[in-house]
Amino acid sequence: MKYPALFLLLSSLLLAGCHSPEEPGTAPLVGVGVYEIRPTEINRSWRFSARTRPAETVQVQARVPAEVAAVAFERGARVEAGDVLFRLDDRTQRDQLRQAEAQLASRSSALELAERNLARGLEVADRGFLSAADIDRLRDAQAQARGAFEAAEADLEQARQNLDYTVIRAPIAGRVGDTTATAGNLVGPGSGPLVRLQATDPILARFQLTDREFQQLLQQRPLGLDSGLFEIGLLLEGDRRHPWAGTLDFVDIEVDDRTGTAEITVRFPNPDDTLAAGLFVTVELETRETESRLLVPNQAIGRNQLGSFVMVVGPDQTVSERSITLERQLRTSAVLEAGLVAGERIIVEGLQKARPGSRVQSIAYDWDQASGLLAPAELLQP
């Protein structure tokens, strides 16, 4: 053959072109991490925005007119039930008490005399010395004396109470607010509250449920809600958790047709006064019993004008976009309501590189639900 060397060279170049790893005009496959959707046992939970409020609030007022002699508390301090808050000038009340005691003594003597007169009259009436009219007058005098005596007893009791009212005590344990009453101020029943007292242990958190949320909670027990069904927690700013668990305090009996909401109040211990009234907080209700649900990692969820979606990788490694409906959001995932079935694979890594209709090279990822960590399955193997 005339050109054996050239023929061999062209043949080798053609063969090399046929065995090229990438066809001309074909893009390399994009590598993505995929997670297989599978049932997971979870506690059903809800989160609600709430505002704290005191369990009890008392407006402390003066019950008798008098000058303030002393203010016996520090504003903002904690007091116990029975602690003295104010002392009033009690000279007028002491004078009234002495007058009431003297009046009662006088009425007591008059009653004793009227009773003796009636007794003597009854003794001689049988012998004909007194007429029936005379006996009636004695009976009437005795009845009037007894009425005056009982009125004097009531006046004395009122005078004692008025004297007690000159020492104003805390009716409940809690924190006292600010006061404008100082020594020398004249106060009385018509002068308005002297100070406000709030019971802060326990403290309440109040929030509203939509009619749908209310129905979901009621479904946990047909006869109503029970504190034993739930773990109730309180989250402060920055997801800082209150150390004490809560209990249900009040559950509304109906949904308000004007607002479409139902009210719930939860009670939390607050022995260290770490909570104050008026705070915005998050109440977390979690069922004690678990249920099997499909969870979607937050990293896999995209959102557009139509709602939430994920990228699904089919058996032939082709990507498709799938709209999904989420029931509720958890800390590192969302609970799926519709759009996926167990066993389907969704993209959790490389989401921004995948396009619907394209083929990808997938790597199986696994997921630690507690931390939210997603990584190749082989790296998470124990």
Image (cartoon, helix red, strand yellow):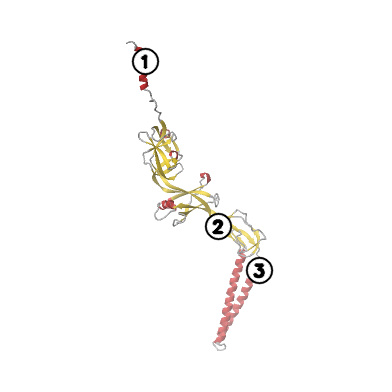
Label 3, on which residue?
95
- Residue 181, compared with residue 362, is above or below; it is below
- On residue 9, the disc is 1
Spatial separation of the CA atoms under disc 1 and disc 2: 99 Å
Can you name the residue that lies furthest to the left here?
Answer: 1
Spatial separation of the CA atoms under disc 3 and disc 2: 34 Å
Label 2, on which residue?
57
The crowd level at tag 2 (other Cα within 10 Å; few <14, some 14-19, many 20+) is: some
The percent coordinates of residue 126 (x first, y second) are 54, 87
Can you name the residue that lies furthest to the bottom here?
Answer: 128
Q: Mark 1 belongs to which amino acid? A: Leu
Examine the rendering and report whether any part of residue 153 can be seen: yes
The quarter holding residue 341 reads top left
Disc 1 to disc 2: CB gap under 8 Å: no
Disc 3 is placed on an element classified as helix
Tally the marks. Answer: 3
